[in-house]
């Protein structure tokens, strides 16, 4: 198997590009895809101060690595979610990554700074863990960006993430969500600009970037995300991708090219009635005098006794499979 | 060969030689959601694996937003 660019030995095949690459030219392809996404969607200027939302996983560490390599001024923000050993380990990977590269990293701890953690919030709200987790992270990334004077928040959402969310929104024909599923959310009403430079790269490519670049990241899945709906959508899309390489890219990038403009008028409506939260001052969609969803979550969760991960986690399909294999022996 | 699998982390022993894509197919692991790594280096699907190799099959799907 030979590299498409240099004809040297390839280390990875990318059926969607009908090509194989050596390490050097694979990295070059990834950089070009990120530069194209940034350019095509006017994501980041060279003079911008960038805040990268990092989790210790492959995507956020890879995008931080790429942006620094491409010459952007990018700092990191890690939110310690209190999901047992998983959070401890992911924090170690993030701190090591930043220290080895002499990058600025800020850590916010839900337990130490706000008196709760995700397992406890999950128990209190009775909703899926990703709901309390996503809401907490969005609020804290917004706050850190505004307080720190950053021009743009970068997240590590990749092509698989966006295709899976698009698939879910289309299954429900959730037109408002479809209309807002864009790679750039402009700064408005006190919310910072948010961008997704990895939309042209798959998660297999991001994991490969990390292996080639020697970036250690947390490989294990979040124990509270196991079996969630989006993972199921990704598995379905990967079955289609294996049969017809390029499906995920044509689905999501085609949506951006041809469907998002049709939905633009819907995206422009709504979210105009924003008022400051009476407790924290963050913009919120409620009426005058409202308390934002984050402050309500903090109030309820911090008043509850801490709950362990094991108490609220679901048994994953992979664990069930391994246990079933073991019981057959 | 020794094969390290993840989620959860475990090790299995596979007898005989195989190409990478044949091993993935045998284990029911889709190529699009896995990488195969030997001595810290990625190896492509057509690479022949030796019976003495130690490899990691790393899943790449992550969830939660």
Image (cartoon, rainbow, N blue to C red):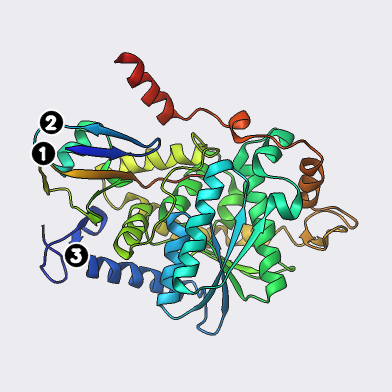
Around disc 1, counting alpha carbons within 10 Å, would you say few (fewer than 14), some (14 to 19), or many (20 or more)? some
Residue found 60% across the figure and 50% down from its top: A177
Which residue is at the front of the view, A25 or A41? A25
To the question of a shared chain for discs 1 and 2, the answer is: yes
Which chain does the residue under circle 1 lie in?
A: B
Specify the farthest residue to the bottom.
A47
Q: Secondary structure at mark 1?
A: loop
Residue found 91% across the figure and 56% down from its top: A289
**Marks 1 & 2, CB-CB < 8 Å contact:** yes
Which chain does the residue under circle 2 lie in?
A: B
Q: CA distance from mark 1 to mark 3?
A: 25 Å
Numbered disc in front, either 3 or 2? 2
Q: CA distance from mark 3 to mark 2?
A: 29 Å
**Marks 3 & 2, CB-CB < 8 Å contact:** no
Q: Secondary structure at mark 2?
A: loop
Q: Is residue A198 visible?
A: no
Residue A95 in the image: x percent, y percent? 52, 62
The mark found on residue A22 in the picture is 3
Q: Earlier in the sequence, mark 1 or mark 2?
A: 2
The mark found on residue B51 in the picture is 1
Which residue is at the front of the view, A198 or A58? A58
Residue A235 in the image: x percent, y percent? 38, 39
**Marks 1 & 3, CB-CB < 8 Å contact:** no
Which chain does the residue under circle 3 lie in?
A: A
- Is A85 on the left-hand or right-hand side of A65? right
- Is A28 on the left-hand or right-hand side of A18? right
Q: Which residue is mark 2?
A: B15
To the question of a shared chain for discs 3 and 2, the answer is: no
Around disc 2, counting alpha carbons within 10 Å, would you say few (fewer than 14), some (14 to 19), or many (20 or more)? few
Residue A2 in the image: x percent, y percent? 11, 62
- The quadrant the C terminus of chain A occupies is top left
- Is A189 on the left-hand or right-hand side of A186? right
């Amino acid at each position: 198997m030979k590299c498409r660019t240099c004809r040297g030995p390839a280390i990875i095949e990318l059926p969607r590009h009908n090509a194989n690459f050596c390490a050097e030219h694979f990295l070059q392809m990834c950089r070009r895809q990120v530069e194209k996404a940034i350019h095509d969607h006017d994501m980041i200027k060279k003079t911008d101060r960038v805040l990268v939302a990092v989790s210790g996983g492959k995507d956020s560490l890879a995008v931080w690595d790429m942006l620094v390599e491409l010459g952007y001024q990018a700092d990191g923000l890690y939110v310690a979610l209190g999901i047992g050993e998983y959070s401890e380990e992911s924090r170690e990977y993030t701190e090591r990554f930043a220290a080895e590269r002499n990058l600025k990293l800020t850590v916010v701890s839900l337990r130490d700074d706000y008196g709760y953690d995700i397992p406890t919030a999950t128990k209190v709200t009775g909703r899926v863990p990703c709901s309390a987790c996503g809401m907490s992270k969005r609020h804290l990334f917004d706050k850190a960006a505004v307080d720190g004077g950053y021009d743009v928040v970068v997240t590590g959402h990749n092509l698989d993430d966006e295709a899976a969310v698009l698939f879910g929104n289309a299954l429900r024909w959730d037109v408002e969500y479809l209309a807002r599923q864009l790679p750039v959310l402009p700064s408005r009403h006190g919310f910072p600009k948010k961008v997704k430079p990895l939309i042209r790269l798959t998660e297999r490519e991001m994991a490969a970037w990390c292996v080639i670049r020697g970036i250690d990241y947390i490989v294990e899945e979040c124990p509270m995300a196991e079996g969630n709906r989006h993972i199921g959508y990704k598995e379905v899309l990967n079955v289609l991708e294996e049969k017809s390489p390029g499906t995920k890219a044509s689905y999501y990038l085609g949506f951006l090219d041809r469907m998002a403009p049709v939905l633009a008028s819907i995206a422009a409506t709504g979210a105009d009635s924003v008022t400051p939260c009476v407790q924290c001052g963050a913009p919120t969609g409620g009426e005058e005098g409202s308390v934002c969803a984050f402050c309500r979550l903090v109030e309820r969760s911090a008043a509850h006794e801490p709950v362990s991960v094991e108490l609220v986690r679901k048994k994953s399909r992979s664990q069930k499979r391994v246990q079933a294999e073991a019981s057959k022996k | 060969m020794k094969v390290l699998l993840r989620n959860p982390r475990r090790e299995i022993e596979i007898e005989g030689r195989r190409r990478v894509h044949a091993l993935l197919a045998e284990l029911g692991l889709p190529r699009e959601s896995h990488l195969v790594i030997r001595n810290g280096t990625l190896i492509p699907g057509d690479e022949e694996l030796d019976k003495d190799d130690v490899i990691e099959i790393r899943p790449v799907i992550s969830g939660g937003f």
